[in-house]
Image (cartoon, grey):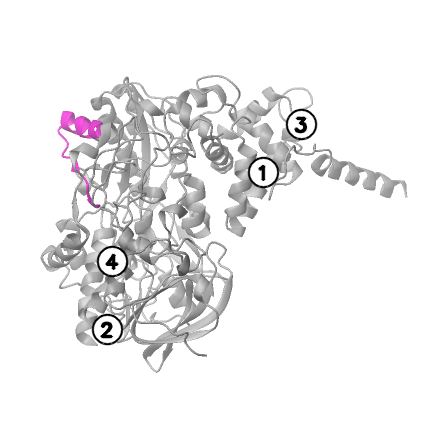
Amino acid sequence: MSAPSRRAGDLRVFAQYDRDFTEEVDVAVVGSGPGGAVVAKELADAGQRVALLEEGPPFTPADFEIDGALSMARTMREGGLRATRGTMMPTMQAIALGGGSLVNSAICNRAPDFVLEDWCTQFELEHTTARDLDPHYDAVGRFLGIAPTPEDVLGERNLLFKRGCDALGYASEPIARNVRGCRGSGECFTGCRTRAKQSMDISYIPAALRSGASVLTSVRVEQVLAEGGRVLGLAGRVVAPFTGRPSHRFRVNARAVVLAAGCMATPVILQKSGNLANRSGQVGENLQFHPGVAMMGVFPDAVNPQFGATQAYQSRHFLRDGFKLETLWAPPALLAVRLPGSGAALKHRLAQIPYAAIWDAIGSCNRSTGRVLTRRRGLDPTLSWRLHPADLEILAKALWALSEIFFAAGAHTVVPGVHGIPEELHSRSEAEVLRTHSLAASDMVLGGNHAFCSTRMHGDPRRGVVDEHGKCHDFENLWIADTGVFPRCPSVNPMWTAMALAHRTAQTLADRL
Amino acid sequence: MLGWLLLALAVGCGAARVAVGYPRPQRRFMRLARGEVAFLSAAAEANYPPGGDVEASGLDAEIPAYVDRLLNVSHPRSRLQIRMLFFLFEHATLLFPAPGRGGFRRFSSLWPEQRVAVLEAWAGSRFWQRRLVFASLRAILTLGYFAHPAVLRQLGLAPFVLESPICEADLLYPRVGAHPTSIPYARDDLTDPSDGTPIALDTPLDPRFAEGAR
């Protein structure tokens, strides 16, 4: 096998592969989402020869599908129809250059101090306090221009949330996002046509290329190669965009490998590589999510929800109670699928959307855990996960809080979308049923937001896969830099924390190479 | 001998009730079979009848055509699951009949009011698995309904026309599947990034959703 001629710092796409090939680099990084892109850029800046490998293709604005389902079918693994077993809950993983950052709503939150203190205490970590991570948060924040959403692009549905929280005395604030020049198009989930969102494909990856990194897209890493206690590199196949049809084989020889394929893929790669780095038995274990619930409120006046930043206001008032509240917008079809009823009643409800806002809650469901399991064929995982009864109470309480804020903001109707509860609630007293009714997990429409912990960090090598810098306990030159390393869910949106940890991982690795 | 003949007759009748007698669709579909088109048309009309607060019906919104496009870009496993879902709904009434006369027929052969009753029974079932199956079907129908420009226009939710500034990334990436030599931009083509001017609500609609698009 030989490598096609290519300058360092090039990006390669599917149409350019015409034979099997081998690469020689200092560091191979698997996955171009927020973790991998940061590692690749920082290591390239430090003078290392870096190859960033991504299974998905790069998307241009002309490739974005405005239709929600068609967009998901192209940008998400398993067409966006992945779900957990146990407690049935849809969850997603992107397959695109830039990973989830291409199709998320750019929310950036630092992990709260009390969460990081809990991580340090419970998981024997010494250098993962807020003070330790702040320099890394700051570096990422400066690079991406992370800042609170400006008021002129909030739009009515975000401002109504603020008014509701203010009326009840609940703390709330505009969400900080990795965005420059947002115009409030509300299209974060299908790709930002205004190029305002600083997703990895337009921020860190071009910067990594400028610093000399190679970026190989449409390559599926199938195996980490290891021998005698050292990782030698990676092997895999070139795959066609969208169909995943494999063609040429490749191998990347590297002095170090960083897995940043995401919490649901990194454990599968390790398991498919002969159950690598798993002396602790923790690879694929401890899977956690931030399960989400959402609710629609209808107001007397037009809300025009299609205008405004996708998710731009939040309340962390209830973080210590186990949930965070935030505003939400998505392609109307994806929002409408949650509405109850059929026939004329459903059409009536759809006609209310221009007068409606949709808000959601994410739960810190630490007691609800699961596993990432490898299937015999392919790299898509089987996910088992079960919602713990105590965490169900958190979500029920979050639903009640959302309804309370809706009515305080002036909504005349709330549509909870919960089986066993009236389809519409018209007052705060009617909404009491959300507190008094005994709910089952199957009564709610849950969303599996954010996934964590499948290769968790732990100070004790017997109880975790990596140390707090992301180095695998079992290997000197194998590292992990995605949300799988979180020891517990962070209670807030994880992207900024994943990037801060990846920034630290890159610095530590650069020092050791 | 008579027993075998009766058994063969019964099997033949059963197979006919499952698979035979669907009308030929008025257009060609990439993925959908004749029976699936009939089922989707019936379900679309039951879930989104004509008239009411949103004028377009499920058939006006060309839901079967949308589902055909969706299946065509779907992951093979998802495609199989979706088709199994259609099969289940279409034929469940052969075992668990719809209310009223002639309830032991395929969903697409039922009277309109029977179809509505069947959907409502699935939606309100005390078994969550059954509700989940219904929610999956209704999600697909709703995705198709909202994909139609006329529906989005009527609700005032059609996307605006948006100019994409040309940034550094546009010099690096070709369209999906294309060769980098097809990238139409050079450094001189770079434009100023978005200045953050909020989109006005009277901004023209994206041409794909504007009046006359469909």
The residue labelled by disc 1 is: B86
Identify the amino acid type marked 1: Phe
Residue at the image point whose x is 25% and y is 50% from the top:
A198
Circle 2 sits in a helix, a strand or a loop, which is it? loop
In this rendering, the label closer to the viewer, 1 or 4: 4
Given the image, what chain letter belongs to the residue carrying mark 1?
B
The residue labelled by disc 2 is: A48
Circle 4 sits in a helix, a strand or a loop, which is it? helix
The answer to which of marks 1 and 3 sits earlier in the sequence is 1
Query: Which contiguous range is marked in magenta?
Result: A159-179
Give the percent coordinates (x, y) of residue A257: 31, 71
Compare residues A155 and A495 and report the one nearer the observer. Answer: A155
Identify the amino acid type marked 4: Tyr
The residue labelled by disc 3 is: B109
Residue A401 visible in image: yes
Spot the residue most to the bottom: A228
